[in-house]
Image: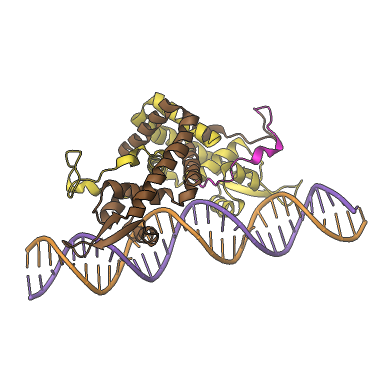
Chain colours: A brown, B yellow, C purple, D orange
Amino acid sequence: MTVSKTTVQDQAKQAAPVGFDEEGGALQLGELSELLGYSLKRAQLKVFEDFLRCMAPLQLTPAQFSVLLLLDKNPGRNQTEIANTLGILRPNFVSLLDALESRDLLTRMRSPSDRRSHVLMLTDKGRATLIRAKKLVATRHEARLIEVLGPAEHKALLGMMAKIAREL
Amino acid sequence: MTVSKTTVQDQAKQAAPVGFDEEGGALQLGELSELLGYSLKRAQLKVFEDFLRCMAPLQLTPAQFSVLLLLDKNPGRNQTEIANTLGILRPNFVSLLDALESRDLLTRMRSPSDRRSHVLMLTDKGRATLIRAKKLVATRHEARLIEVLGPAEHKALLGMMAKIAREL
DNA sequence: TCTATTTGATATACTTCATAACGATTATTG
DNA sequence: CAATAATCGTTATGAAGTATATCAAATAGA
């Protein structure tokens, strides 16, 4: 779909009185606004953008945050388990972990029971960072979303997204 | 976020009776399921996946379909206008158009009034393809989404997505 | 034991997204 | 009017994200 950040700043030419074609006015979105995938993609990009902005002080991407979150709830798992749960392919998970480990947010430890696998664990710094990150998400990011949608719709939205991810 | 298609086929080990940790069971998603961005991204990927599947007979990607749709409603616009409206950067729009033009779905015509710009227009084949594409989207894709969500929630979802894209 | 599988890792490729710069053309402006 | 600036489509290029094949080491299974 390719929806960039630089979005619809096109109507700089000024908004025409709706129902305008032939030269000059803003374009007609047409059935595009009824296409769920289209809106979904644009909304998703906006949400990630906002996440990055809110998380700027900690320099964590959504993917990195999700790893910390999952590790905190599931200590002692190996890379394959965490990656699979997040839908990340093992090869691509390596560099993601490299980055977090180099920042001392987590450690890879050879498992004593199966020396092929790495047991992943948050460091103290990782846990502390996660706590701060959760606060930023709650007080800035999700707060903003709730502000825009209202609490009821925000919750309903969560349910719908989960349903699509699960049942489609 | 990095959410691949190969998703959560991890619980192959069999589902533990919920509220299980320490080895063996499925992982605890934890606050991840409350993270709107996370669910949004996974849902978006699913929706695009379904779109591609439904559109397979016509071999149109979501981005290509959106271009045809927009061109049909806004004939005679140039590349920059269409690209900006879709949030696509001009350089990246070139190869997208190349693909559609080489399939004879649209034409680039030098504008007589401004010989820098290309006026974009659907060909007859492009219009015919668009009609078929719209039918596929309506009868397969959106129909499936409505089946999963129900008509009321589907509509509510459209509204929420538009709101986020617009106001966040 | 011999073979097959799994784990983390590397290499690699393809797609998407972003920026800089160019020639041609048009607009501005001194 | 001439000189400069801006715009259009395009090319080149780079950074991510995503995908597959393959490897050595370790384990599991025959």
Between residue B40 and residue D7, name the one nearer to us: B40
Q: Nearer the viewer, residue B136 or A69?
A: A69
Q: Identify the residue shown where x is 26% and y is 62%.
A: A109
Q: Is residue A29 left or right of residue C12?
A: right
Between A76 and B139, the one nearer to me in the picture: A76
Q: Position of residue D3 (x, y in %)?
A: 87, 60
Q: Is residue A138 visible?
A: yes
Chief SS of the magenta region: loop
Q: Is residue A157 above or below residue C16?
A: above
Up the image or down, A64 lies above or below A158; here it is below
Give coordinates of residue A32: x percent, y percent: 52, 35
| Residue at horizontal 57 percent and vertical 34 percent from the top | A29
> Is A5 within the magenta?
yes
Relative to residue B17, is residue B154 drawn left or right? right
Region rendered in magenta = A1-19
Image quadrant where one finds the C terminus of chain A: top left
- B13 inside magenta stretch: no
Q: Residue at x 68, y 27 (%)?
A: A17
